[in-house]
Each structure stands twice: as C-alpha cells, then as structure tokens.
Image (cartoon, grey):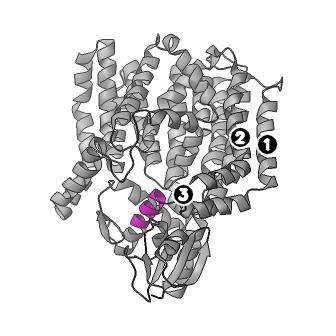
Amino acid sequence: MQVGKTSTPLSREKETFWLTAALLVLILFSFFLNLGTVPLFDIDEGVFCEATREMAVNKNYITTFFNGALRFDKPILFYWLQLGSIKLLGQNEFAFRLPSAIAGSAWALSVFFFMRREIGNRTAFLASAIMVLSLQITVIAKASLSDAVLNCFIALSMLSLLRHYTTGSKHSLLIVFGAAALGMLTKGPIAVMIPVAVSFLFSLWEGTLKSWFKMVFYPPGIVLFLCIALPWYILEYREQGMAFIEGFFVKHNYTRFSSTLEGRSGSFFYYLPVLIVGMMPFTGLLISAILNIRTLLTEKINRFLFIWFALVFVFFSFSGTKLHHYIIYGYTPLFILMARSFPLDRNPRLSVVWPTIFFAFIALLPLIIPEAMHLIKFGYFTYVLQAAAGLIGHAHVVLTVTAALLVIIIQFLPKLSPPAKLLATGVVFILFVNLYLFPLAGKLLQEPVKEAALLSKKEGYKTILWRVRQPSFLVYSESLAEMRDPLPGEIVLTTADELVKTGKKVVLLYSKYGIVLAKIMN
C-alpha cells in the first residue's frame, strides 16, 4: 500500500469503503477489546464513575457530587453520557467506559473523513490508523474519563476550521462553533481556547488577520455556540451561585494552570518522555516527522497542523498542573504530520527499534522488579511488586519475546508494503497491550479494591477509607464512605503498610496485594 493520492484499480468510492472497514476493525481491536473486563482504575476513573453513580441515585442532573460533596472539576456532558450508558446497559465497567470508546471512534473516523479530501484517502487512513494503534490513544479511549470526548470535539472543531480555511465553507465554520460548544460542556474553556489561539497564530503567520476577526465573530456561529453551551452554565450558577464560579472557573481552570493542584506537577520538559512513550509503537515515525519538519512546513495545511500541536505542547508545558493526557489535545495534528512524513522516511525499518525497546523492557520485568523492591522504601507498592513478581513468570517472558519477534519478522516480509508493515507492527503491539498488559495492571492494582468493595456491599459494612484514595471502592460498594482515622470497632479500607506503621490490632476481613479490609480492635 503506497501512501498518497495515487489512483488504484478500485474506484475512489470502493477504496474509501474498504479503508473505512479496515479502520473500524482496528478501532474494534484498540478501543473495544477488553473494554468491560478490567476493573476501574483509580484515581480518575473511580472519581468520574462514582460522580455519575451518585447522579443516578440522587437524580440531580445539573450538579455533580462525589462522595456526597459538591464536585466542580468538570462540566456536565460526560456525566450525562455515562448516565445514559449505565441506564441502558447497567452499572458495569463496559457501560462506564462506552462513551469514551465511542468518542474515540468518532475522533478517529473524523480524522479520516475530514483529511481524505485534503491529503488523499491512503494518507488520511494511515494517519487515523496510527492514531488508533498508539499506546496513549488506546488508553484514553478505554478510560472512563472526559478526555476522549473532549478530544473528539477538539478534533472536529479544528479539522472543520482547516476545511473552512481551504474551502471558505460556512457550514464547516458552524461545525467549529458547535463542536467547541460541546467541548465547553465537556471540559470547559480549553475547548474554546485551542481553536481561537491556533487560528489567530495561523492567521498571523499567513497574514490574514482581517479574515480571522470575521471568522471568530461570525454571528450565526456565536448564536449556535451560546444555544448549546450556555443553558447548563446558567442553570448551574442559579443552583450553586458563586461556589460554582470559584470552584470551576477559578480553582479548576485558572488555578490549575497557574499553580499545582493535587500534587500533579512536573518540569517544563515533562511532556517529552510522555510523547516518546505515548506514541509507541510509532515513536520512530514521530522522530522522522520532526527531522523533516522544514519540508513539511512548505505546505499551508502542515503549517496549521504544526501550530496546533506546538500551541498545546508549549501551553501545557508552562501549566503548573501537569497530567499526561493534557498533551493528547495536540496529538491529532501530530498523527497527520507523521503520516505525511512517512514517504520522506529513508529507513522505515528503523521504526522497529522503539517497539523492540518497549518489549525488551517488559520482558526484563522479572529481573527489574526485585531490584526495584530493594530501591523503593517500604510502602503499598512493595506489596504490589511482590504480587507482580509472583504473577510474572516464564510465560510472561515467552509471550513478550514472541511479540517482539513478530514485530521484527514483519519488517522482512517482502510482500508487505512499508505502510502495511508499520500498521501490522501496530496491531501486534496493541493486541499485546489490550490482551495482556491492560488486564495484568487491572489485576494487580484494582482487582483487590473491587473484591473488597463487593465484600463490603454483600456484608453491609459501613466502611471508612483510611489513608487511601480508592474512589472505585465507592462505585463497587454502591455507598458513600467517610475518609478519616477510624475508631475502635469500625471497619476500614486501607493498605497493609498503614496497618504495620500504626501497629493497631485488627481482624482481617480481606487482604490482597497490599489492599486490606479490616476491623479495628483498638
């Protein structure tokens, strides 16, 4: 398969059909495989799902609560989507995560269908496919967080903005405003800031600022935006008043950028290693795009894409609060640039180096884990590493080495074109992640919390969360829990190391991989 606009014996319509079908298969493997079989991960998945569960219980569809307290972290749309999903499918992992998987699918398909007119069917397909098969995207599209939904709306608004630049379409401009409004309902002002800032910088670069002002202040677009985004903000303000303004706009937007919240900080270079790991197994193609950036920037479309990524990268590098998924807001243009740079890559086989390094690291875990246990201080993760050492044995090494060998062998199959080899590598990688690593992480980190919560629910325990942050416990136990030091006779969820440090006498009700459910005796 050659990348580009070259014609084939198939008609363009048939080619589009088969490429769409292939993309849907990749989406199925990446976003839906094991979607509902792995427990919810703490902290973020647990918090979102518990807020949605409490919405279903208290039937307040305007304001969100977590553990009975007001939650102003995010706007309302993602909670509505989760609520609809669990009402339809029941309260389970698949239902909680389904909105993200659907949003991720729409995101990938939008890249293909918007960009095929600009860069050709096959290059657009390659951009969408490497997006779907990248590590950080498969994680975010399987997580019950608002980020996949937000990224879908950001991609829709930005790709429509690009279409407007190339065609002058007013219809595309309306999509920009509509998608930005839905993004505003999903995560707030960031959904507006990105298209406004990127379009300003691009217009400044191209010398078309007059057109920018006309575009931004397009009356039908503004009306559409206000009709979609404004009603909930008005209702929430009427219900909560200044507490909403201070909690959402001040604390979780302005303060999140200007200072560190929840201990989530990092240096200015925080997102460089995130990029290297998050783009696996296509990190080599990312490096190729960087090396060919001068050539790429000779085209107007690529300049727009570059500004989009650069703005997100620089903005969040300066942010006081750093989370790995913030950089994903700028991933869509990177995937397109990577696909467009692929024909410029003189040594595509070298791209196999990065997934091979990844597999080598995973294969060496049986040797790395004992060393890590000697280095870290005593704590909860000591128990997790002990459990991992017990679960990871010869089968782990054989499976990982087999995956690595498959990736290497693919590079030397003569009947496969370079793009096909690239995507085949991605398929092997994503199947390994979704069928092995994802379940293994869930078993080690979250299975004990789920089992303890289900026991607590079954026995009707009133459980105290003692020096732990495991919001998924609330979801599975279907109850609220105080977070404080316990009194004698009370039942707590805590970690084994906390019990050792305090020296309290307890009756163990459940213990696994460092997670403990116990009754305090003194």
From where the camera sits, is residue 120 visible? no
Left or right: 375, with 520 as reference point:
right
Residue stretch rendered in magenta on the structure: 43-52
Tell me, yes or no, whether the two marked residues, 1 and 2, touch with CB atoms within 8 Å: yes
Q: Secondary structure at mark 1?
A: helix
Under mark 3, the amino acid is: Lys
- Label 3 to label 2, Cα distance in Å? 27 Å
Of marks 1 and 3, which one's residue comes earlier in the chain? 3
Name the residue beneath numbered marker 2: 359
The spot of residue 486 in percent (x, y) is 40, 81
Residue at 59% in and 20% down: 288
Name the residue beneath numbered marker 1: 401
The spot of residue 12 in percent (x, y) is 63, 24
Q: Which mark is residue 377?
A: 3
Of marks 3 and 2, which one's residue comes earlier in the chain? 2
Compared with residue 319, is residue 45 higher up or lower down, i.e. above or below?
below
Under mark 1, the amino acid is: Val
Residue at 72% in and 49% down: 367
Q: Quadrant of the C terminus?
A: bottom left
From where the camera sits, is residue 327 visible? yes
Mark 1: give few (<14), some (14-19) or many (20+) Cα within 10 Å: some
Q: Nearer the viewer, residue 175 or 251?
A: 251
Q: Quadrant of the N terminus?
A: top right
Left or right: 219, with 330 as reference point:
left
* Residue 50 is covered by the magenta coloring: yes
- Label 1 to label 2, Cα distance in Å? 7 Å
Left or right: 421, with 90 as reference point:
right
- Label 1 to label 3, Cα distance in Å? 31 Å
Under mark 2, the amino acid is: Phe
Report the number of discs: 3
